[in-house]
Image: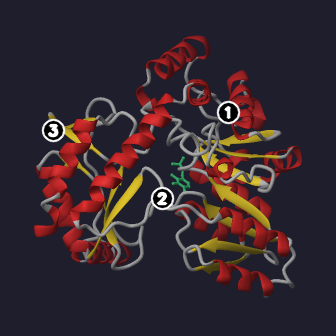
Amino acid sequence: MDEDMKDISNELEKIRKSDLYREMRVVEGEQGPYVMVENKAYLSFCSNDYLGLANHPFVIKAAIDAVKQYGWGAGASRLISGNMALHEKLEFEISRLKNRCSSLIFPTGYMANVGTICALVEKGDIVICDRLNHASIIDGCRLSGATLRVYPHCDMKKLEKILKNSAPFRRKLIVTDSVFSMDGDLAPLPDIVTIANNHQAVVMVDEAHGTGIFGKNGTGVVEHFGLENEISIIMGTLSKAIGSLGGFVAGDLDLINYLRNRARTFIYTTALPPAVCAASIAGITIIRNDHSLRHTLWSNIHYLKERLASLDLELVPSESPIIPILIGDTKKTMDAAKFLFERRVLIPAIRPPTVPNRSSRLRITVMSSHTRDDLDKLLDILKDIKHL
Ligand SMILES: *Cc1c(COP(=O)(O)O)cnc(C)c1O
């Protein structure tokens, strides 16, 4: 092997030795509250498919019908010849769900964040992030060339301080997750908006885990806080509660027209297959018209959280379907995940660099399709985690 490649092997060995090596298991059959691994059924608390829409009959039928009518691939980027009726319809439905004039879809949420942030800020601008923002936000900030400042998680005093010292910058952009994906808590959006207004900063909110779950109409955390007229840039993904694939940005017409002209992750990539759009439209239709899935999800969340509280585990104060159990030590966290796996329960061990050092955790995500029996089974097994 040549010398450069040997370097990679050494790096890999280091990853293995620190219990940070990542492997994938294969899930057979469909995604749901139970998944099949090596022909055995496992109770899953790993999925972002919060409302079970990835396998909803209405969604599946929409995708199949679209394949029959439009075929599979889009064949080109949106700006060349890949812009089909279903892309436009999906953008219309997203705008309506989010109560915005307009929206733009990207192939993934990751690309929506990277492309949007890079289009909005550059050298001479400042972009300000919560410490726990999603990796796609951080990558967008780094790639943009703007000055990146990070404040400790939800620390509004620090945010204000950064803005006070940011007068020389041309544009000031604050970007935050609405629901933090590894802690499950909410960003203090009302405070962020007030501070932003005091310092002429623009706010961009990532509703990846908020869309379909929060707010009276399932619009997201922005609706939950009544801030729909206060936040200029809403980003979200179609890959979580909507059960499909893709990312989007919603906002006013000029923002969207600008992104269509400047977001490189929109311009230089092939459009989503039309059937993916059809499935997302079906998912959004269910979210808009049938609130029962969301109500079941929240009742599951409350049930599980109440009972977890009596188990003497260290819980992160979550306000969402994401419920982390903090363990700290990486090896112990891996052992706990293994213990659960042996008892046919899938809960991922989340380790650095996804979370800060010494904050490894088990991350439970609840779905509307979990039954009370499923939740009781989990609680029963978690009782023994403490004694590992
Ligand atoms: C999952 C996630 C994304 C990325 O979305 P994909 O559609 O999976 O690429 C972006 N931001 C946050 C906060 C997320 O949790």
* Foreground: disc 1 or disc 2: 2
Q: Nearer the viewer, residue 306 or 104?
A: 306
Asked whether, in this view, residue 362 is left or right of residue 323, the answer is: left
One can see residue 38 in this view: yes
- Residue assigned mark 2: 181
One can see residue 121 in this view: no
Mark 2 and ligand 1: say if the CB distance to the nearest ligand atom is below 8 Å: yes
Q: Nearer the viewer, residue 334 or 271?
A: 334
Up-down: is 274 above or below 257? above
Q: Amino acid at mark 2?
A: Ser
Gap in Å between the C-alphas at discs 1 and 2?
Answer: 32 Å
Q: Residue at x 68, y 47 (%)?
A: 223
- Residue assigned mark 1: 76
Q: Mark 1 falls on what kind of element?
A: loop
Dot 1 or dot 3: first in sequence order is 3
Q: Position of residue 100 (x, y in %)?
A: 79, 41
Q: Position of residue 187 (x, y in %)?
A: 59, 64
Q: Position of residue 17 (x, y in %)?
A: 22, 76
Mark 1 and ligand 1: say if the CB distance to the nearest ligand atom is below 8 Å: no
Q: Residue at x 10, y 68 (%)?
A: 387
Q: Residue at x 67, y 57 (%)?
A: 205
Dot 2 or dot 3: first in sequence order is 3
Up-down: is 104 above or below 124? above
Q: Amino acid at mark 3?
A: Glu
Up-down: is 28 above or below 354? above
- Residue assigned mark 3: 38
* Foreground: disc 2 or disc 3: 2
Figure quadrant of residue 118: bottom right
Asked whether, in this view, residue 245 is left or right of residue 281, the answer is: left
Dot 1 or dot 2: first in sequence order is 1
